[in-house]
Image (spheres, rainbow, N blue to C red):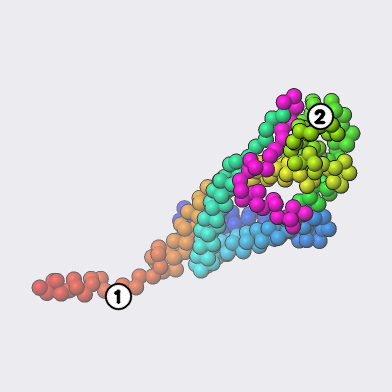
Amino acid sequence: MYHFSNTVVGFLNLLTLLASIPIIGGGLWMARSSTTCESFLQTPLLVLGFIVFVISLAGFIGACFHVAWALWFYLVVMLFVIAALMGVTIFGFVVTSPGGGVQVPGRVYKEYHLQDYSSWLRNRIKEPEYWRTIRSCILGSKTCSKLASWTPIDYVQRDLSPIQSGCCKPPTSCIYDMATMVAQDPDCYRWNNAPTMLCYECDSCKAGVLEDVRRDWRRLSVVNIVIVIFLIGIYSIGCCAFQNIQWAQTGFPYGPNWMTKVRPTWDNYWWRW
């Protein structure tokens, strides 16, 4: 039981070390791909893969080969990783709290409005360069081409994804009648029948993308909570392993004893008095 914590830390870090190799490989594969959506994710994947690789290697070497400085480096970096994950999780819940769709009367699907989402997400999606990248991804995925054969009955009876609802059709409230002079949603005037235009420049399209981001981010936040709890447990075991190494090397759990006298100097003077 004395070195049980070292064995557990070493085994778990060996698993994460092996898991980091496919992550790095996936990032390098995306770097070679010409698809805009895939190359857009390559940098986060590569950074994540290398961080996991370095941390796992330090933890494995420190725990299995009793290298104190490597395990100390592992614990310090792990502390920063736990703090960063907790910060990202809290930020994610705050940013994704507003949002959600509005049910359309007589329809199964919902429609989404840009003003319903947090200001941080709205400002991010409105950046021209960022939106051009996402627009290219939607065009490349051919999400809207799946609706080309739909009949008016299909739009009444079938559900739509947030992107399909916002990007592939005009808002349901739009009335395209030359005699109609009623003020309408600005997205009604942005709609175009051309397959490469549709409603890709509509606010409803951006809102549909944000709804997808919101759902994915909230799922990721739940996963982050589980990961943080797991990492805190591993960090605690790592602290025990670090104490084991210090004890084995110096005979003291927190490093060598630098005290040269059993009693301090003031204690000697007290006894003389």
Q: Amino acid at mark 1?
A: Thr
Q: Mark on residue 47?
A: none
The image shows residue 183 at horizontal and vertical percentages of 74, 36
Q: Amino acid at mark 2?
A: Tyr
Quickly name the residue at label 2. Answer: 155
Q: Toward the viewer: 191 or 273?
A: 191
Seen at 87% across and 29% down, the residue is 151
Q: Is the residue under label 1 in contact with that under label 2 (CB below 8 Å)?
A: no
Q: Give coordinates of residue 145: x percent, y percent.
A: 86, 40
Q: Judge whether residue 186 is colored magenta.
A: no
Q: Which mark is residue 260?
A: 1
Q: Residue 60 location in percent, x, y?
A: 58, 61
As helix, strand or loop, the secondary structure at mark 2 comes to: helix
At a point 56% along the width and 50% down the height, the residue shown is 91
Residue found at x 79% / y 25%: 157
Q: Is residue 245 above or below residue 228?
A: below
Packing grade of label 1 (10 A; few <14, some 14-19, many >=20) is few
Residue occupying image coordinates x 78% and y 47%: 201
Q: Is residue 29 left or right of residue 250?
A: right
Q: Secondary structure at mark 1?
A: loop
Report the front residue among 226 and 72.
226
Q: Position of residue 194 (x, y in %)?
A: 89, 44
Residue nearer the viewer, 229 or 245: 229
Tell me where the magenta segment starts and ends, as one range: 105-133
Q: Is residue 205 visible?
A: no
Pointer 2 or 1: first along the chain = 2
Relative height, residue 49 to residue 172 (above, below): below
Of tags 2 and 1, which is closer to the observer? 2
Crowd rating for badge 2 (residues with CA inside 10 Å; few <14, some 14–19, many 20+): some
